[in-house]
Image: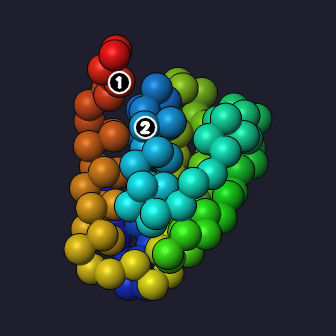
Amino acid sequence: MLEEPRGTMHGWILGPNLLPFVERITEITRCRDDLSAIAAGVARSDADTDDWFDVVIEGETRVELYFAKAPDGDVLVDVELEGLDPDNASRCAELLDICCQYRLLREAR
């Protein structure tokens, strides 16, 4: 994963990890957003035609997320963080890394 100054991260996540990824990002930034709208927007995106879906999450910090669904179902991700402290920026980078290597499943309660 390439990590740039200004808190910009690029990577990809396994398709089924989309909602867990966004849920954790919103928790890190202390924001509540409509996750179903994000999932619908990503479903309409297309990495092959460079048709990206973007969303801005405004919480204690500003996060811009850009998604493009690949033909294999994985999702390309660009994350731009504004004003996020270094610890939380590291958490976001680690989350992106985990979401491309492991399939996350929510515990049934």
Residue placed at 61% from the left, 63% from the top? 57
Observer able to see residue 45: no
**At 35% from the left edge and 24% from the top edge, which residue is drawn?**
106
Instruction: Tell whether label 2 touches label 1 (CB within 8 Å).
Output: yes
- Marked residue nearer the N-terminal end (1 or 2): 2
The amino acid on which the numbered mark 1 sits, given as a three-letter code, is: Arg
The N terminus is located in which quarter? bottom left
Q: Which is more toward the observer, 84 or 50? A: 84
Image point (49%, 47%), residue name:
22
Q: Is residue 52 left or right of residue 102?
A: right
- Which image quadrant for residue 88? bottom left
Q: Is residue 87 above or below residue 92?
A: below
Placement of 41 over or under 104, stated as above or below: below
Which residue bears the numbered disc 2? 20
Q: Nearer the viewer, residue 88 or 1?
A: 88
Mark 2, Cα crowd under 10 Å, few <14 / some 14-19 / many 20+, is some
82 horizontally vs 28: left or right: right
Give the residue type that dot 2 points to: Pro
Name the colour scheme. rainbow
Label 2: state its secondary structure.
helix
Of 32 and 102, nearer the camera is 32
Structural distance between the alpha carbons of marks 1 and 2: 8 Å
- Which circle marks residue 106 in the picture? 1
Res 71 seen here: yes
Image coordinates for residue 101, horizontal then vertical, percent: 26, 36
Q: Residue furthest front?
A: 109
- Measured as percent of width and height from the top left, residue 84 is found at 40, 78
Of 91 and 13, the residue lying toward us: 91
Rendered image quadrant of residue 21: top left
Q: Position of residue 89 (x, y in %)?
A: 32, 71
